[in-house]
Amino acid sequence: MEQLLLGSLSGGARLRIHQAFRLSAAALAGEPGEWPTQILARLDSDKTPAIQRILQNIVESREGCWLKPIRAPLIASGGPIERVIDVGAPYDESRALIRCNDGITSFRNASFRTWDLRAERETQRIDLPIDWGRAAISNPPRRAVVMASQRQLLVDLEDAAAEVIFTGGVIESVAISADGAWAVTTSVPPDWDYAKQDWNGPRTLRLFDLERKSCVRTWEAHRALINDLALSANGRFLATGSRDNTAQLADLVRPEDSRFVEMREGGRCSRADSVRTPYRLRFRTARGSTEKWRPRPQNCKLRRRPWLPRPE
């Protein structure tokens, strides 16, 4: 159908039709008969005479009862988004996604999948022997850490191999440094009872040296569920945001320089992004706004021996 519509067009109008079909490719792969609704929704705001004639022809050529969109809720053709990739599953909290060069690597449930954006096809899939997990992927995607039940797995994405590097406690979230050398997990104490304590209470954080495949530091932070955490590229700084209405930036080389901030108007930090300097912390609140802070000093509660990351 795309080629039939393109046959009577040229220039910008032809490009718009092609972009609309490209954006609709993921949806039409499963429901090819939905192409009229997809194209109408993506091009409805384009008032070019040639485009409007095509849209009118689509409306008039449809037989029987079908739904015409009242407004365009879909991504419009001609915008900054070039294509939509169907990853074969809906969004959920087990997701992880990294884009590197011309490829995308993602994780959901128990599978890592890699797509070649130029070839527009899936090039690799790694299925883990677990029911469900949550992952963090290095960038470039050479390594990943997966938490599943009470186990933590280290996955070599290049060799498609996985091994357990830690067992114990309920692991709630995980982050990995871009170089794949360090990882941090958050968990609750061993005797934790969600039915009695809900999401409140201190969290245990563990730092892993992925080259040695071992935990090198354990400490406590926050007073409620940690919504998100992020490591800087070299693994030195750790940013966390919690339901206790605070965000923290831990300096893992100089713990005395670690900092914290209180959320404005009691907002919860839903997303944290670590940066290179220990004096800035960027996070996104549950309301969707992005904030940047210069937090005041706050010491971390640290246990076990001192640790130093590799230099940059």
Image (cartoon, rainbow, N blue to C red):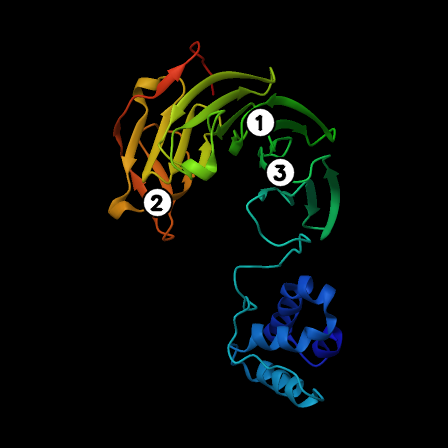
**Where, by quadrant of the figure, is residue 153 drawn?**
top right
Q: Secondary structure at mark 2?
A: loop
Q: Residues within 10 Å of mark 3 (few under 14, many from 20)?
A: many
**What is the C-alpha distance between the residues marked 2 and 3?**
25 Å
Q: Which residue is mark 2?
A: 268
The image shows residue 123, relative to residue 156, as above or below, that is: below
The disc labelled 2 sits on which kind of residue?
Arg
Q: Residue 256 occupies which quadrant of the picture?
A: top left
How many C-alpha atoms fall within 10 Å of the one at disc 2: few (<14), some, or many (≥20)?
A: many
| Residue 146 percent location from the top left of the image | 61, 32
Mark found first going from the N terminus, 2 or 3: 3
For residue 76, side relative to residue 241 (left or right): right
Q: For the point 75% across and 78% down, which residue is it?
A: 4
- What residue does disc 1 label? 180
Q: Give the CA distance from mark 1 to mark 3.
A: 19 Å
Nearer to me, 135 or 198: 198
Q: Which mark is residue 48?
A: none
Q: Which residue is under mark 3?
A: 133
Residue drawn at point x = 70 percent, y = 81 percent: 8
Residue 109 in the image: x percent, y percent?
65, 43
**Dot 3 amino acid type:** Gly
In the picture, measured across the screen, residue 299 lies left or right of residue 151, that is left
Pick the residue in front: 27 or 312.
Answer: 27
The residue mark sitting in front, 1 or 2, is 2
